[in-house]
C-alpha cells in the first residue's frame, strides 16, 4: 500500500532521483514532464544518426550517484557503463597546452614539464583541499529548513574552512604563483556559471574532486543516467507522464495540494516536488499573490549564473582531439568580465569542445564525429537580440576561433547536421529564467540556509529539487537535492529513509 501520493513537476535529474527514491519506499509517485523525453537539461539530443548530451558532459563525484542507486538497493553499474577518462581534459592557452590527469604521477610529470618548481605546490593543494571537502561535503548533504541548522556541528566545523571574503582565484593564489597554473585550477568556476574572481573560495574543492576522484564518461552520454533513473521509477511502480506540461501548483491556505496541467485537469497529491527551473517556477507556476519571499520582483533582484551558446555538430569525419578540451581566450580575465560585468559579446572567447566519439562509438556512425561546443556568455540580462542574423554571426565567430586555435581546420566542410542553442532558446524553449543555464548564482549569500530550501519556505507540503535549491547546481549536487527532499518526505510520513 502506498504511503502517500507525490507528484513531481519535471523529469530532470532532481525529479528523477527523488522519484526513484520515493517510489522504492512505497510512495505513489507521478512525474509530469513537458518534453517527450526524460532529462530536462540532461536529456539526449538526437539529430539523425548523431547523439548528444543537451547539457552536462563532465561527470564527477561518481560516489554520490552510486549512493543514490544503493539507496534503492541497486548498483549503478547494472544500468550504466562508465569509462574513467585519462587525461581528464586538455587545457589550451596561447603558448602551451596542459593534459590534466587524475593520475598523480602523470600530473606531476606534466607540471614539471610546463611549470617547473610547482610539483610540491600541487601536492600541498591536494592535501589541504581534501580536508576542506571532508568538512564541506556533510554540509551539502543536509537540509536547512530552520535557521538553527546553521548552528549544527557540521556547519560550525566548516566555518573556518569557508575562506570567507576570498574568491576561488584568491585561494589558488595561496598555492600557485603562475597565472596559467592558477587558471588550470580555477576555470572550474564555469561549472557553476561563475567567474573565478567572484566564485567563493570554498569551491576550491571542485578541482580537488576532479584530481582525487577523476572524471567519467557514460556510454551513450550522461543523459543515460536520467534514462536509467526513469527505468527505476517505473520498476518501482511510479508513473512518468511525458509530453504533459504543468500549468501551475494548486495551493490553498499556504499549502500545496497538487498540480493543474495545461489541459486543465487537476492532480491532487499529499506532497508536491518542483523540479522546474526555480525562478521560472516562482514566476510561472504560482498563482499571483502566493509568494512573498520569492515574488517576481524579488526573484529579479537575485544573482544568476551566466548563459551558454551551444553548437551541436554531426560531422562525416573522425577527429582525434581529446574527449574534453578547453580553449582559453587570449585575455581570459577580460573575457570573464565581458560575460559577468560588461554583459557583451566579443570575438576573444573561451570555448569548450567535447569529442565523445573518440571513446564512444554509439554516438555517431563509424568514421564520423559528434562534437559538442559550448561558449560561456552573458545571460539574457545582456539584452542581446538573438535573431537569425545574430546567431549566424556568432556561430561564424565561434567556428573561426576553433579553426584558428585548434587542429580542427575543416569543420565547416564536414558538417552533416547541426543545432544551435542561444540564451533566448534556453529561456523560451527550456523554461530557464534569463537563460541562466547554471541557475541561481552560488554566492555565499545564496548558499546553504540562504539558498531556496528543499522544504519550500512559502508553501507547506511543497519541496524543491534541482540546481536552484540546496545544495546547488551540477549533477552530483542535484542528486543530493533529490536525496534530501526524499528524506524530508519520509520523515513527514514517519517512515524511515533506510530500506
Image (cartoon, rainbow, N blue to C red):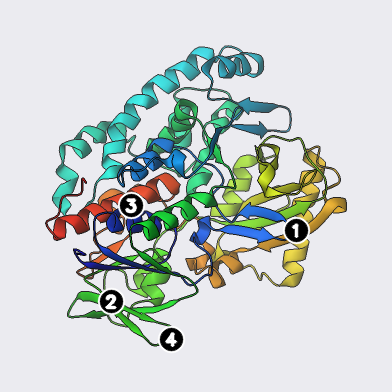
As measured in the structure, the alpha-carbon distance from the residue carrying label 1 to the one carrying label 4 is 38 Å
Q: As rendered, which of 473 and 195 lies closer to the eye?
A: 473
Task: Identify whether 205 is placed above or below 244.
Answer: above
Kind of element beneath mark 3: helix
Residue 440 visible in this rendered orientation of the protein:
no
Residue located at (31% from left, 43% from top):
73
Residue located at (37% from left, 25% from top):
130
Residue located at (37% from left, 53% from top):
17
Q: As rendered, which of 239 and 255 lies closer to the eye?
A: 239
**Dot 3, crowdedness within 10 Å: few (<14), some or many (≥20)?**
many
**Mark earlier in primary sequence (3, 1):** 1
As measured in the structure, the alpha-carbon distance from the residue carrying label 3 to the one carrying label 2 is 21 Å
**Mark earlier in primary sequence (1, 4):** 4
Left/right of residue 254 with respect to residue 347 in the rendered view: left
**Mark earlier in primary sequence (1, 2):** 2
Q: How many marks?
A: 4
- The label nearer to you, 1 versus 4, is 4
Q: Which residue is under mark 2?
A: 258
The spot of residue 358 in percent (x, y) is 70, 37
Q: Which residue is under mark 1?
A: 395
Task: Identify whether 50 is placed above or below 352.
Answer: below
Q: Which residue is under mark 3?
A: 481
**Dot 1, crowdedness within 10 Å: few (<14), some or many (≥20)?**
some
- The label nearer to you, 3 versus 2, is 2
Kind of element beneath mark 2: strand
Kind of element beneath mark 1: helix
Kind of element beneath mark 4: loop
The spot of residue 93 in percent (x, y) is 69, 33
Amino acid at each position: 500500500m502506498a504511503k502517500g501520493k507525490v507528484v513531481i513537476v519535471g523529469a530532470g535529474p532532481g525529479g528523477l532521483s527523488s522519484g526513484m527514491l520515493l517510489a522504492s519506499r512505497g510512495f505513489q509517485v507521478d512525474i509530469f514532464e513537458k518534453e517527450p523525453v526524460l532529462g530536462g537539461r540532461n536529456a539526449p539530443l538526437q539529430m539523425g544518426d548523431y547523439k548528444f548530451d543537451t547539457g552536462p558532459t563532465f561527470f564527477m563525484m561518481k560516489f554520490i550517484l552510486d549512493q543514490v542507486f544503493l539507496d534503492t538497493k541497486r548498483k549503478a553499474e547494472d544500468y550504466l557503463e562508465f569509462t574513467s577518462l585519462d587525461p581528464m581534459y586538455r587545457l589550451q592557452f596561447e603558448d602551451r597546452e596542459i593534459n590534466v590527469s587524475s593520475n598523480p604521477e602523470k600530473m606531476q610529470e606534466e607540471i614539471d614539464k610546463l611549470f617547473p618548481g610547482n610539483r610540491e605546490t600541487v601536492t600541498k593543494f591536494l592535501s589541504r583541499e581534501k580536508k576542506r571537502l571532508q568538512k564541506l561535503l556533510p554540509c551539502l548533504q543536509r537540509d536547512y529548513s530552520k535557521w538553527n541548522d546553521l548552528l549544527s556541528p557540521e556547519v560550525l566545523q566548516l566555518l573556518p574552512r569557508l575562506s570567507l571574503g576570498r574568491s576561488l582565484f584568491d585561494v589558488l593564489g595561496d598555492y600557485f604563483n603562475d597565472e596559467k597554473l592558477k587558471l588550470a585550477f580555477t576555470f572550474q568556476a564555469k561549472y557553476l556559471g561563475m567567474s573565478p574572481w567572484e566564485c567563493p573560495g570554498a569551491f576550491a574543492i571542485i578541482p580537488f574532486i576532479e584530481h582525487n576522484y577523476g572524471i567519467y564518461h557514460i556510454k551513450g552520454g550522461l543523459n543515460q543516467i536520467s534514462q536509467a533513473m526513469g527505468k527505476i521509477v517505473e520498476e518501482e511502480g511510479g508513473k512518468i507522464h511525458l509530453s504533459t506540461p504543468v500549468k501551475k501548483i494548486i495551493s490553498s491556505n499556504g499549502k500545496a495540494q497538487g498540480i493543474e496541467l495545461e489541459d486543465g485537469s487537476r492532480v491532487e497529491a499529499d506532497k508536491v516536488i518542483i523540479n522546474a527551473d526555480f525562478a521560472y517556477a516562482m514566476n510561472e507556476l504560482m498563482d499571483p499573490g502566493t509568494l512573498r519571499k520569492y515574488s517576481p520582483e524579488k526573484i529579479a533582484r537575485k544573482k544568476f549564473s551566466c548563459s551558454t551558446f551551444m553548437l551541436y555538430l554531426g560531422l562525416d569525419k573522425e577527429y582525434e582531439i581529446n574527449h574534453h578540451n578547453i580553449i582559453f581566450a587570449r585575455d581570459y580575465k577580460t573575457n570573464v568580465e565581458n560575460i559577468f560585468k560588461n554583459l557583451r559579446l566579443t570575438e576573444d572567447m573561451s570555448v569548450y569542445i567535447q569529442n565523445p566519439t573518440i571513446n564512444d562509438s554509439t554516438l555517431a556512425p563509424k568514421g564520423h564525429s559528434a562534437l559538442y561546443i559550448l561558449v560561456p556568455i552573458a545571460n539574457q540580462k545582456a539584452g542581446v537580440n538573438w535573431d537569425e542574423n545574430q546567431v549566424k554571426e556568432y556561430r561564424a565567430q565561434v567556428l573561426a576561433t576553433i579553426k584558428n586555435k585548434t587542429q580542427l581546420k575543416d569543420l565547416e566542410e564536414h558538417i552533416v547536421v547541426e543545432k544551435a542553442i542561444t540564451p533566448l532558446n534556453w529561456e523560451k524553449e527550456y523554461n530557464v529564467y534569463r537563460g541562466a543555464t547554471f541557475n541561481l548564482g552560488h554566492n555565499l549569500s545564496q548558499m546553504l540556509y540562504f539558498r531556496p530550501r528543499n522544504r519550500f519556505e512559502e508553501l507547506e507540503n511543497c519541496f524543491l529539487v534541482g540546481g536552484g535549491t540546496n545544495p546547488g547546481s551540477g549533477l552530483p549536487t542535484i542528486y543530493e537535492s533529490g536525496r534530501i527532499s526524499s528524506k524530508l518526505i519520509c520523515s513527514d510520513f514517519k517512515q524511515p529513509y533506510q530500506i
